[in-house]
Image (spheres, rainbow, N blue to C red):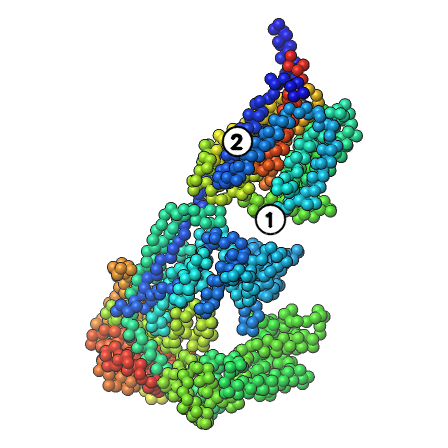
Amino acid sequence: MIFDYQLRNYKFRILIYMILLSVLGILAVGSASNQDNSSVIKQIVGVLLSLTVCVVLSLIDYHRYFRFTTIIYIVCTGMLAAVLLFGRTTKGATRWLRIGGIQIQPSEFVKIGLIIILASFLSRNQEKISEPKTLGMTALICALPVGMVYLQPNLSTTIVICFMILCMIYIAGISYKWIAGAVAVGIPSFAVLIYLSLKGLIPFLQKYQAQRIMGKIFHSSSEFTDLNRQQDNSMMAIGSGQLRGKGLFNNTLSSVKNGNFLSEEQTDFIFAVIGEELGFIGSVVIIALYALLVYECLSIAARARDTAGRLIATGMAALLAFQSFANIAVATGIFPNTGLPLPFISSGLSSLLSMFIGMGIVLNVGLQRNNVNVQ
Amino acid sequence: MFDDLKEYLRDWVKRVLTSRLFVLAVVFCLMSFTLIMRLFNLQIINGENYQNEYTSMTEKVIKTASTRGNIYDRNGNVLAYNELAYDVTIQDAGAYKTDAQWNTMLYNLVSILNKHGENAQTSLELTIDHDGNIAYTSDTASGRKRFLRDYYGLKNVDELDDVDGKYPSDITASQLLERMKKEYRLTLGDDKSKDGRPLDKDGNPIDVSDEVALQIVGIRYTMRFTAFQKYESTTIASDISDETVADILEHSADLVGVNIQESTIRVYNESIYFAPIIGYTGKVTSERLEELKAVNDDYELNDVVGRTGIESSMELELKGKKGSTTAYVDNVGRILSVTDEVAPVAGNDIWLTIDLNLQKGIYHILEKQLAGVLLKTIVNQDEKDITYIDSSSIKIPIKKAYFQLINNNVLSIDNFASEEASDVEQQIYQKYESSRARIEQELKNELQSENATPMNSLSEEMQAYMQYIYSYLSSNDKKIVQKDAIDTSSDTYQAWKNGTISLREYLYYGIASNWIDTTKLNIQSRYSNADDVFTALIDECLQDLEQDSAFEKLIYQYLINNNIVTGRELCLALYSQNVLAYDESEVNLLRVSGEEYAYQFLMNKIRNIEITPAQLALDPCTASCVVTSAKTGEVLALVSYPSYDNNRISDSTYFAQLNADQSLPLRNNATQTLKAPGSTFKPITAIAGLEEGVINSSELINCTGIYEEVSNPIRCWKYPGFHGPLNVIGGIENSCNYFFSEVAHRLSLESDGTYKPEKGLEVLKKYATMFGLDRTSGIEISEATPSISDTDPERSGMGQGTHQFASVQLARYVTALANRGTVYNLSLIDKETDSQGNLVKDYSPTVAATLDFNTNTWDCVQQGMRQVVTNSSTKRVFDGLDVHVAGKTGTAQESKKRGNHAFFISFAPYENPEISVTVSIPNGYSSSNAAMVAKHVYRYFYGYASLDDILNSGALDASNERINGD
């Protein structure tokens, strides 16, 4: 059945963009780890493995997954439950599972699982999408895995997943009435709530509690000095990269990275290394590559054979766009400090593999494009 | 076909615009755009700023101290220099990662230090007291809170005692040590995998003693302060012995990051003679730092600077220039690369105008003169048997001297109670203990009795204790009795003043009239009655007195006065406490003899200066002498007795002892002690009279013995006798009060003959100002500001009134008398040279004024002063001295109960003055004592006596006889 596909529909460009990002990632990880061979080799192996999985998956008909949605759901929630029960705790959060010698981060895979589950569910209920019952069911399905991710605690991944879910529901065709309603009610009431709580006008919420909550969100209280310093140093590194950057693998004394001022520089803050060493030009190239990838996903979504395919491609586009945006936004100080890997670049197998898996499925959606539209 | 295309395009646009995917694409585009904008802002607009910010964050300038300049006397004798010392420093070189590695290394280091009797000195404010308990060393409760704040890593002491109980401030010292031992894993906690105990050579864990643990956690705690400045090393032991240095270097392979650093300690030669001039160095205070930074930005926190004296006033010259190392450091301050190094420049040397041998000789002359005065003053009589004549001839009962041994801390009363106390000390202590118990019981009985005895009817001793309790309650520390709130017009207050009521009655009155602050008392109920308040008051007071050493001393005073503790016992205790070097025959003699012998014994020790006037702190115990060169205004000697050892000033025990010393050794008596000059002022009045034309040199004024032109008649000292007619020379020679009253009076007359005191005062002030007596003398150390009398011209003209001058100011004045009118700004500094000995700056005294008086005026005054020495009652003092001295004595009475202040200003040789000598002995009874000092100074200066002669002599002869006319 592999050969049922028309190879001219295969989006090689997506593969090329991903490979470019991965190569940049390997270089950045190499530089960030001060050319530590084991880190670099691990990353190369991870990329090769993930790429292989991606190519294989791109040839498997995505409809076949829909038969296993229940199993996928059980596996996802099961893994998350296992994390909460037996997970490894680092820096106050429990996010990792050790299986054999490998450490995996289930929430990364849950993202892809949820895309498939939701794509299947929403496409089957497309006509009734705006009915409260359908929306309620959707919420119910998502609540368990999202809730467990939140409890790790992993607020940033929770937000990424929610953004992705909302984008999929939107593309599934939810009535604008719902959207307008949500916006009309949600935004003002949220604003009023914040205003009242900061003024100490909500009886059950003390003023200092409200401030503490806001402080937690915006890291303004003193217990976050380390997090803030991490972010300030990242901004300093990126800024000091200026137009051309200080070059990969440099050994200049003027490097923030070489002065050891960066932390998490192979993972969540890898963009600090990129910004410093590749400069504005390199940074823009990376953002452009993400934009192109997202564009390709959306274009596949536009030409998908069916709603399910469109939803998968949309979900991946949203995931890729928002996660890369959020990561860079943290590194450049737009968002408060929160840990998210940069897709294809940050070291770490879970993130790498899950992104490639997702893109593999999207590639298959593209392979089965709706030819009617093109003619 | 064209329409088709149009149709198709319109369709496409419509589809795209209504497409939800398009909306998403727009959102994603906006996100990318936001990021690019942000990056543009960071990297292009602010990129350079970020790079600069980073560079300034990582570029560190590490200052290296320069060598402080030396101080020499005028002949090149070293007075202050730096001695090389070795410090142990420690730096985190990254060699040790685990607690066990750190603790093992530090265990080895501490073991080496302890083996050589050194201890690690850390910022940890914990210690093991002599009972073996862990205790805080913080000075105050707030000091301890600040320490705990730092320990918990808080920004503010207010964050202590939080709701979660994470930062308790009431943690005991031993709890804290346990906590730190756990924190640094010196003890095996629950988690066996995290055993951080130090390992011995075979790799077995060692359980360290608290003493060692205290040092290990102390070092680790101190290193925390430089955790992000790893380029800075932490000093953990200073001035260690050569053996320790060798031992540490031998084991340096096991002590990575431990370094021996050379440092210097300031050493003062002949310290006791020069301490009041040179002063001392110490850590810079924050106010001083601000001042110094304003002129030299080299100064930093923790710098050692001159605190007083020349060390302080010549700070900028002595300091030198710090060296610096510029380096790039990483996030924890480890040096990545050194970019620049500048070597420090040693400070300049300062040469004083002072002559070491003269300074030294005069110090001993002063001490021996004071001892001589004491020998004449202390009598083996009880206070009640001594009859008071006047304040020139006061006698001090020997018991007062005995008591001073305790009162001025010559003998330590704590030692009486210690386990190592000798038999005689135990004997004294037992007497004290039993008396104390009796006194406390009596006090309690008296205070609790319904019909307490009025103060007047109590024994003198009980009255003293009652008074002590009252002044204790109203002291500034306690303020339980609020003196301001007392109604002084009330009958009860008057009764208390007159002693007709008891303390109990008075305090009850205080409770009723609300001048007793009950909030400071430990009272359970807010609605207590007067009885409860009184009981709480008395309980608290008696409890406090148990620890009160002043009260303890008061008891000793009465034990000595009542012959319970005897002088003989106290003299023996001097040997027990090593105040006197042990002398078996003396001790045996004291043991078998009585009180008469004890008196002889103590007088003998005073005579031999084994017990010094400063130790006894009786009147007189202070003196000063200033010698200037009459021709140049250089100060050749500026001596203040008593003095201190500035080498030991950083020892806090010693410093506390100096502060408690009643002879005030930290005060420079030549510059800080202001007194009325007495008759030494008379030459100024004579000059004013001659220059203003109210008298002429041949004019005679007839002394009748009492000057009655003023409302409060002034008696001449000769009254009821009289001098008869005197000219100005005779007036000075005889120090005739009548004569100078008349001159001052004439100065106060307007041209029409009306008497106007302001005029006379104005003229006297004008002439005193000419001699520089309105301002400080110009020497380079701090000096009290003088004041010229502003009341009663006649008495002011005799040197009484409200004149207040320091010896050094009188010295400037007499220097101008000697050289006939050149008023110098005195100077202690001869020159400044760089460390190679090249002259940097030559200091010579500047001329403040040249007084252009008639030759005749100078002749009269100088001749008068010469005749003081040759003809007057002072003649006896100078008999047999070949140097022709001219001078003027002075006596000033401050209190009838204490001895008069004695002064002598002088110069010599009379024919061609070379030097001036000014002597002041506060409470020195008679100016002949001051003149005697001057005579010895001249003898010494002109080679009639050697330094050895002075050092080997005993107390100098003193006369408490009246010098006529002062």
Q: Position of residue B98 (x, y in %)?
A: 53, 54
Please give the label number shown on residue A50. none
Question: Which residue does the image show at 54% across and 30% down from the upper left?
Answer: A21
Question: Which residue does the image show at 62% across and 36% down from the upper left?
Answer: A350
Q: Give the Cα distance between marks 1 and 2.
A: 37 Å
Do the residues bearing badges 1 and 2 touch, measured as CB atoms within 8 Å? no
Question: Which residue does the image show at 20% across and 76% down from the upper left?
Answer: B911
Question: What subunit carries mark 2?
Answer: A
Question: Which residue does the image show at 45% across and 72% down from the upper left?
Answer: B654
Residue topped by disc 2: A23
Q: Quarter of the image for the C terminus of chain B: give it.
A: bottom left
- What residue occupies the far right of the structure in this picture? A133
Residue kind at label 2, given as amino acid type: Val
Please give the label number shown on residue A223. 1
Q: Residue B156 is drawn in which quadrant?
A: bottom right
The answer to whether residue A151 is left or right of residue A132 is left
Residue kind at label 1, given as amino acid type: Glu
Q: Compared to B201, does A54 lie above or below?
A: above
Same chain letter for marks 1 and 2 = yes
Q: What secondary structure is marked by label 1?
A: helix
Q: Is residue B765 visible?
A: no
Q: How many marks?
A: 2
Label 2 crowding class (10 Å Cα cut-off): few <14, some 14-19, many 20+? some
